[in-house]
Amino acid sequence: MHLAQCLFLMMAFLPLVNAQAPADDLKQSLSAGFIYGVGIGTFTPDVSKAPAYDLNYAFHLRPWVAFEAGLDQIIRPIGTYTTLNNGIPSSTDTKDQLYLLPLGVHFYWSPPQTHVRLSAGGGAAYLNHHFGAPIPYQFTDVSAFGAQAVVSADVALTDSGRYRLGITAHYFYVKENTEVTTRILTVGPEFTFSFR
């Protein structure tokens, strides 16, 4: 490669480097938000009716890649379960909690001269569905491992990129056993605080 071609490539990528520069020293970030969950496939509870939130920690190896770990909690996705006993409805509060723990790698890209940042990633996931009350036999505590994928878009609220507001979508795929596969999509707004 000729020197002129090298200089041209360096000049072409200079705006991208400058766009990332203000956030280069922000190695860690904490995110939190409210999410809307959607059960897909064989997942029994209607998670869309339950309140949910997410918390996330990221360590940025470079401005464009980070290791992340998080927690998504869906509060009482089943809630009250109604059965018929000799034709008479009987309700039981299951007091259930659904925990989803994503762990993986996240890749970031910022268009030059903007405060916008796009990202995608994936990795492993852990699911725990806990029931806090005596319930019918068909509902039992579940703990299982699986996979997850994530995409997000956010915008910096400050020039430094320390505060960001965006939207994140997470897809969880967990095989509980040979017959039951849990697939959940969570989507929601997220606020991110970055620090050194």
Image (spheres, rainbow, N blue to C red):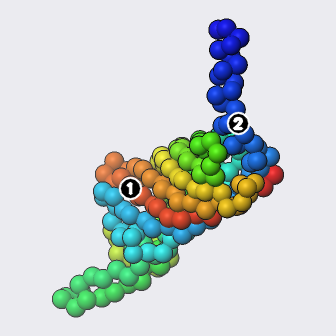
Residue lying at 42% horizontally and 50% vertically, measured from the top left: 173
Q: Quadrant of the N terminus?
A: top right
Residue lying at 68% horizontally and 16% vertically, measured from the top left: 6
Q: For marks 2 and 1, give the CA distance.
A: 41 Å
- Lateral position of residue 4 relative to residue 125, left or right: right
Considering only vertical position in the picture, is 95 above or below 160? Answer: below
Earlier sequence position, callout 2 versus callout 1: 2
Q: Which residue is the site of mark 1?
A: 182
Residue lying at 66% horizontally and 57% vertically, measured from the top left: 156
- Lateral position of residue 165 relative to residue 80, left or right: right
Question: Of residues 145 and 25, which is closer to you in this image?
Answer: 25
Question: Of residues 123 and 88, which is closer to you in this image?
Answer: 123
Which amino acid is tagged 1?
Thr
The label shown at residue 17 is 2
Residue 142 in percent (x, y) is at: 45, 61
Question: Of residues 192 and 143, which is closer to you in this image?
Answer: 192
